[in-house]
Every structure is written in C-alpha cells, then in structure tokens.
Image (spheres, rainbow, N blue to C red):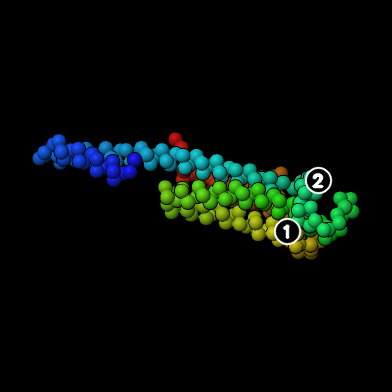
Amino acid sequence: MCVFHFLGSIFAFIKDNITGFSWLTGMYFAYRGLLVWRAQMTGKDKYEVAKNLLTTIYNVREKIGYLRSPMFMGGEIEAGMKKHFPDHPFNFYDQSAEDEKMVERAVMAGRWSKVRAVLLEYQVIKFVAIVHWDKPIENAFRRFEKVINGLKIRVDMLPRLDKNAQDGSKEKFNDYIFGLEDEATDKFGIEFNASIEDIKAIIRPALK
C-alpha cells in the first residue's frame, strides 16, 4: 500500500468523524500508527535484503573457492582449450611452456566466468542494500570488491609470467591466487574473509 494513500485515508476518516481537540489527538495516534506500520515493513524488507545479500555473498565465496583450487582437472583443461584455442594442437602429455600458459589462461577464464555470473547477482542486491544501510555498507562493499578486483588482476597476469623468473613473481602470484593449506598464511583468504565479516557485522541485526 502506498504510504501517502494510507496516511490520507486515515486522516480523512478522522477529519470526517471527529472534531476539535479529538481530531488533533486522532492525528497524533494515526501518525504513531503509521510510524509503527512503516517500521514493520522496513524491518521485513531489511530482513529479506540481508538474507538475500548474505546468500549471494556466500555464493561468490563458493565460486571464488573453486577458482582458487590449485588442481586443474582434465575435463576443464580440454573444454577450456577447445573454447579459447580451438586451432591450437594440444597434447596433455607433451606440453611446451607456451602450452602451459594457454592452459592457465583457458582454465582460469572458464572458472572466472562462474565468478562473474554470481557477481552480477551481487551487483543487483548491492544497490538495494545501500538503500537500507547507506554509507557504512557502501564502504564495506568497496573493500569487498577491492579484494576481488585484486584477485582478478593477478588471474589475468598469471599466464604472462615466466615460471622461471628470477624475481619469483610467478610463485608470488600463485601463492595469492591459489588456496593454501595453511589458512593463517593465505593472504587472499584473510583479506577476503575479513571483507565479508565487515558486511555481516552491518546486516547481522536485521537477521535477528
């Protein structure tokens, strides 16, 4: 129901049926009732938005977890190579350094497409959440996206790096991109999970 229509109906009823001081009293209680009604509706909306946002954030985390798996499966290698390098002759058992870079590019592109799909869902719910929680959650979203963008830059750079580079750049990128067994030293994981906790801290009251 439109708020203005609701308010107008209540005030019209009071004006037609009550006069004088009672009319003013009636206006006061009608206004208080409107505030309660709006608070109930807003609370319900915030609960739904918070629930959907958290579900979407966890979905992003799941897809990024898959992206960060250090194991490249044969099926995804084959599918990725056929999609991105259909004219390139490829042999699983005889790979050149250039082949390895192509495999990295093809597999990571396929994995990132799944991340990108859920990030589109995130962008929709993100703007709805900003309406409810304003600047605090907008800042939290900015931190969340900054971590993801940092990962994407490294994913794009990975196939361009020489694994035998003396500066160890390839190893550094690998250590950041791919999940490590020791969570205490997983730099991306620490940054990413901290950004999720920032968002959860803001929306948690609405989930009670």
Q: Can the viewer see residue 172?
A: no
Quarter containing the N terminus? top left
**Which amino acid type is shown beneath numbered disc 2?**
Gly
Q: Residue at 56%, 44% (x, y): give it.
A: 56
* Pointer 1 residue: 158
Label disc, if present, on residue 74 of the rendered structure: 2
Q: Position of residue 6 (x, y in %)?
A: 28, 41
Is residue 120 found left or right of 175 in the rendered image?
left
Q: Residue at 39%, 39% (x, y): give it.
A: 43
Residue 81 to residue 206: above or below: below
Task: Work out whether mark 2 precedes mark 1 in sequence or the reverse, and give the earlier one.
Answer: 2
**Which amino acid type is shown beneath numbered disc 1?**
Leu
Label disc, if present, on residue 73 of the rendered structure: none
Local secondary structure at mark 1: helix
Q: Where is residue 23 in the image (x, y as percent from the top left)?
A: 14, 39
The answer to which of 4 and 105 lies nearer the viewer is 4
How far is mark 2 from mark 1, CA to CA?
20 Å
Q: Residue at 53%, 51% (x, y): give it.
A: 123
Instruction: Specify the farthest residue to the right.
Output: 94
Mark 2 vs mark 1: give the one in front.
2
Q: Residue at 32%, 38% (x, y): give it.
A: 37
The answer to which of 194 and 94 lies nearer the viewer is 94
Residue 88 to residue 52: above or below: below
Quarter containing the C terminus? top left
